[in-house]
Amino acid sequence: MWTTLLAAALLTGSKPKPPAPRVVFADARTGVAQLYSVQPSGRGLAQLTFGGSTDWRSPAASPDGRFVAALRGQQLWVMRPDGSLARLLAPSADSFSWSGDSRRLAFGSGVTVWTVARSGGPPRRVTNGPDDVSPSLSPDGRSIAFLRAGDPGWTLVVRRDGRETVVAPQVWGIPSWSPDGRWIAFRGGDGEVQFVRPSGGPVRTIAPGAGSLLSAGTAWSPDGRRIAYEDLDGLRVVALSGGAPRLLVKGQTHGIAWRRGGDQIAFATGSGVGIVTLAGRARTLARFAVGEAQAGVGWSAAPKDLRYRTVEPIPPLVEVSGRELRSRVPIRALSADGDRVAYALCPHVLGAWRPGDAAQVPLGNATVAACRPDYPQALYDLALAGDRLAYMVREGGIQVRWWLMLTTLARRDEGTAVASGADCCAGDPRQPPVGDLLGDGSLLVYGAWSRMTPESIWRLDGAPAQIAGADGDLQPLSLDQGRIVARAADGSLELLTADGSVLRMLDVRALGAALAGDDLVVLVQGQLRDYSAATGDLLHAWPLPDVPSTGRCRRLFCPTVRLTLDDAARGLAVYTLDGAVHLLRLRDGFDYTVPGATAAELEDTGLFYAYAGEAPWPGRIRFVPFAELPV
């Protein structure tokens, strides 16, 4: 009996187990970045925030783990670790930090520093600028370290009891207080890890740098004996007692946080969220697909009274039904060949669809996250030829980089680069020096030029090969049945075979052309003409508005063009005037405007056209068989 009572007493008097830790992070898997948390084992993935169209980012748990603060756009919010009881603390914030007692937060807004209670209430302004950013509260909550713009660079300032002290010059990133408040760690002008007393004095360098990193962070271990930091190579840890830094995680990280009372470090990278021990044992907790990664990571606690919610499903990027395709992002480009149409939603995210099929063929990273608007590249041309799909992407400012990509519908990937380059300067409207991409059946061609050479025509069968050129530009305009229509510098047209041999020349000042069987449709200023491809005879001519006009605008810049000739098939021509798509019947000039269409491709099977839909499906493609066209 006494043994039982003693055991019960010991059990009653034992310390309760601390709440289980969880790793908090942001992920844009649904297209809008939300907050998530997961157990250190990688199990129990839960979602904290839902809905809206504004990204959540930079989550940071309070030191006691009982709350999570994060930015939603430019707003500062705080919530419980399961996302409940979310509260708006500040309508405008750039960065923030917690006080050691988890009761207050400091945040930067514009060029000033503020503090606010975790429970809410009016924020209190701490500084008046002129350019104060990246505040960090001391563990006792009485001091604030922040960066102030100066000459040269940023300086580290500590404010305590209304008095400010400049403690270090040439500082980057958010300053980090040691757990006992005796030191402040920061990044130097070349990315080196340094620390200094809050009252000033000698600046000590503990780890070398590898170039300045504006967003690179530092984090003290809970016992204050080590500093974890980010550099271009990955996540490193260095001991204050000396010794070389150790690389624990390879690859650039975008957030680090020590586990309270432990030797584990949570980190976020472009490919996922994980944890690593000081011995270098790493575990991935959640993986990121293309476009999902967000900055920030933290450790929260998980008391038993919390109710974690399951993760919402990732919405499909594309749906099809009958004769219509719907996309969650606008259609950037389309190209039809035969009974199929290829489309681009964003760089390296493409697809192909045959009306009537139950599903489309995705190519590349076909997810909502992969089409987020912060993608650095832009797609500017697209061509489908049978089972092959070629497209062109570019990126850059002063120097433009470009890639000509090629894939197949059977491969279902984004393809490989068959040509690429880098060129200065983006202000030249002929940059990048490739364009005019065309496809039909087994034939894929494009135009290429340089600052010193005119445009020539290249065929894409495996490795690109030049098939035609001239003293001036020779620009490919249209393909049909193994033939190429090309425009010379003086506007005259050449009808070529697939190997570049000349079949016929047409002396006309053409702005654009489309070839369909025997119809060679030519756009001249103020007029659309229909010539016989076999004889060169003029068959029909119909007036068009006398406005700035061109062939299909396949080049990157067409800023002043109002009218373009897009395509032709079975006695019809497609042109676009001031954003409206028209069908013109060549035999009698009957003109029909396609309601709502923004781009169109005409094949012998019918008309494929894109139009803007309502949310959540702003991107739409519709197919109309030839027998149902109202012309």
Image (cartoon, rainbow, N blue to C red):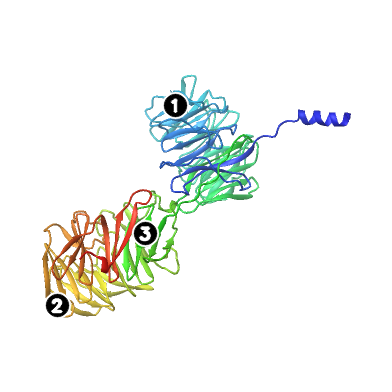
Does residue 207 appear anywhere in the picture?
no
Q: Is residue 529 left or right of residue 364?
A: left
* Local secondary structure at mark 3: strand
Q: Amino acid at mark 1?
A: Trp
Q: Amino acid at mark 2?
A: Gly
Considering depth in this image, is 334 or 189 the residue closer to the camera?
A: 334
Residue matched to label 2: 536
Instruction: Where is residue 139? Give x, y as percent.
Output: 57, 27
Q: Amino acid at mark 3?
A: Leu
Give the Cα separation between the discs numbered 3 and 1: 49 Å
Q: Which label's residue is closer to the chain start, 3 or 1?
A: 1
Give the Cα separation between the discs numbered 3 and 2: 39 Å
Instruction: Where is residue 65? Give x, y as percent.
Output: 59, 34
Which of discs 3 and 1 lies nearer the camera? The answer is 3
Residue matched to label 1: 114
Which quadrant is the C terminus positioned in? bottom left
The reply to whether dot 3 and dot 2 touch (C-beta < 8 Å) is no
Query: Extreme right residue here?
Result: 1
At 12% from the left and 77% from the top, the residue drawn is 537
Which quadrant is the N terminus positioned in? top right
Considering depth in this image, is 406 or 585 the residue closer to the camera?
A: 585
Instruction: Where is residue 517? Give x, y as percent.
Output: 23, 76
Q: Quadrant of residue 236?
A: top right
Residue matched to label 3: 325
